[in-house]
Image (cartoon, rainbow, N blue to C red):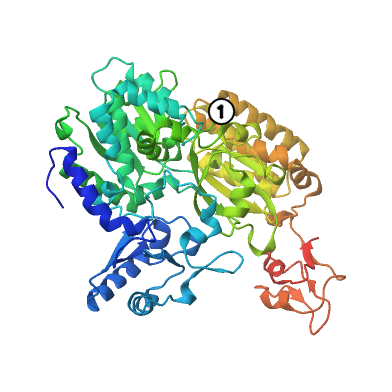
Amino acid sequence: MRLKMKNFDELEKIRKEKRIQLDLRVNSNANTREKHILVCNGTGCTSSKSVLILEKFKELVKQKKLENVRVIKTGCFGLCAKGPIVIIRPEDTFYAHVKVEDCEEIINSHIIEGKEVNRLLCKDIDGSIVKKLDELNFYKKQKRIALKNCGIINPEDIDEYIAFDGYKALEKVLLKMTPYEVIGEITKSGLRGRGGAGFPTGRKWMTAKEQENEQKYIICNADEGDPGAFMDRSILEGDPHSVLEAMEIAGYAIGANQGYVYVRAEYPIAVKRLKIAIDQARRYGLLGKNIFNTGFNFDIDIRLGAGAFVCGEETALLESIEGKRGQPRVKPPYPAVSGLWGKPTVINNVETLANVTRILLNGSEWFSQIGTKNSKGTKVFALGGNVNNVGLVEVPMGTTLREIVFDIGGGIPNGRKFKAAQTGGPSGGCIPKEHLDTPIDYESLKQIGSMMGSGGLIVMDDTKCMVCLAKFYLQFTVSESCGKCTPCRIGTKRMLEILERLCSGEGDMIDIYKLEKLAVNIQKASICGLGQSAPNPVLSTLKYFREEFREHAMEKECKALECKALSKITIDPEKCKGCGLCQKGCPVNAIEGSGREIRTINQDKCIKCGTCLTHCPFKAIGNG
């Protein structure tokens, strides 16, 4: 690695030298004899031994003396359902579900003999073999801005980031723009916060800029606590320098000289790569005092969170950094006026910052043409639940839920039907099938009782119980409440008790009335945004699935069979063919009958696990 540099001209030399070598990463027609083996080392693939795959490839390349082959560690490619993923450049060959024992075959067949390993080529949802990454339906409707470098560069090599225009936006800002011009460009772009309610980023920066104070701070909120969300983690793992560069730009814009990345300790890979990136930036002179003789001082440190969901709320995060218990502050004053240690502080989440350099390099007009009238740019979603293509998705604002679930996500597994999708985690709400064509943007989601949140998108099929879902999110909220205000601390607990009664067959219609009234009061009376939004999953499920609540309260029935106390699994004698497949799958031998006899279920033995439902090919088993 090079020593500390003196000016941006030296960065340009790296950019030109390195980009020639790395052109094959983005250009399948690159004029080169080199091959790069890209191995995903994001958290998902790492959990499936991709680190061992990476080392095995390196060992084989060295052993076989393949001088024109480089093995590269990358961040997440996005299509987590196909991991571990290996991509060979420049031909862009996509290998899925790769194992350590497959490495030698890939080297011998693909690299040495020039023959693709057909059995490892990725298959699309329709079963067709896809040889190249961009031919997959998963990627066709995506537009990668925040995720631009993820899966392309080695996140632990600053030179690779520089090669793809890294720190070029910082150069432009420090040498050619005033702080007000920077803020003006971000404002004109229409960029809004990607971590919650979507507050305009430029307005937040301007508020902090206008405060007369010698000390100001920039904070990156990487405390991603929503169940099922992993967008910010993936950006930090795959492209950490994009966040550091944006923090420097924000610091220049508002007059700050210190930044902090507040990241949860449960993200060990992200933390490790952040530390490496900060160290590299300091050694190059891109962080510290008098950066490249421009007179601009800025440094960044990491603060680890202990996993408290409430510390994702910006003022609770400030309390945590100051060494206090993570509890929200009463607002106003807002952090941009009085934040960390009482000083003006700008807090942006990871995804928001990942857009900043792209806006400044491409222009605010370019960014504002993407998305909808009031929701500009793209949004990254962690697509999970009952969907075939689980993974990381970045789409233009205004893309419909149907496009995300069925075109990109590949639809619902096992031929089941779509029932609902939860956006915004514990602060969001359910979107039922009648709103599948709703454009995903801030205003549209709010109108139907949900919210964007940080970007978790959980898909549910027709086997899911909505009362159970509401209970799940209330359990999370109750356990994560900081306890500062009575409406959240006690109110959510009372709501959870009602939901537990409904799921156990002890509830009634009065409970539903109480549940709704409590939810509305908690929304109005809680101190912070997390408490105010905690009832959202309950209110949205009541709005769209009230009949399920009524069935739980009045008929003591859970048709989805998730509430065991309300479930009674029976076999329809008219549909049963006597095949015995359900009997073979039953773990407690509760199904009786032999030969071609119609089967029956012994209710005293049945544990309501639902295994028989999945084994019956004739759909003869259901909730009696």
Residue 607, percent across and down? Answer: 68, 65
Q: Secondary structure at mark 1?
A: helix
Residue 174, percent across and down? Answer: 24, 29
Q: Nearer the viewer, residue 232 or 76?
A: 76
Residue corresponding to mark 1: 487
Instruction: Identify the residue shown where x is 75% and y is 54%.
Output: 559
297 vs 322, left or right, is left
Q: Nearer the viewer, residue 453 or 134?
A: 134
Viewer can see residue 336: no
Q: Residue flagged by tag 1: what amino acid is it?
A: Pro
Q: Nearer the viewer, residue 109 or 382?
A: 109
489 relative to 557, above or below: above
Residue 254, percent across and down? Answer: 30, 23
Q: Nearer the viewer, residue 111 or 588?
A: 111
Residue 284, percent across and down? Answer: 17, 43
202 vs 374, left or right, is left
Q: Residues within 10 Å of mark 1 (few under 14, many from 20)?
A: many
237 relative to 46, above or below: above
Instruction: Identify the residue shown where x is 56% and y is 28%.
Output: 487
64 relative to 300, above or below: below
231 relative to 109, above or below: above
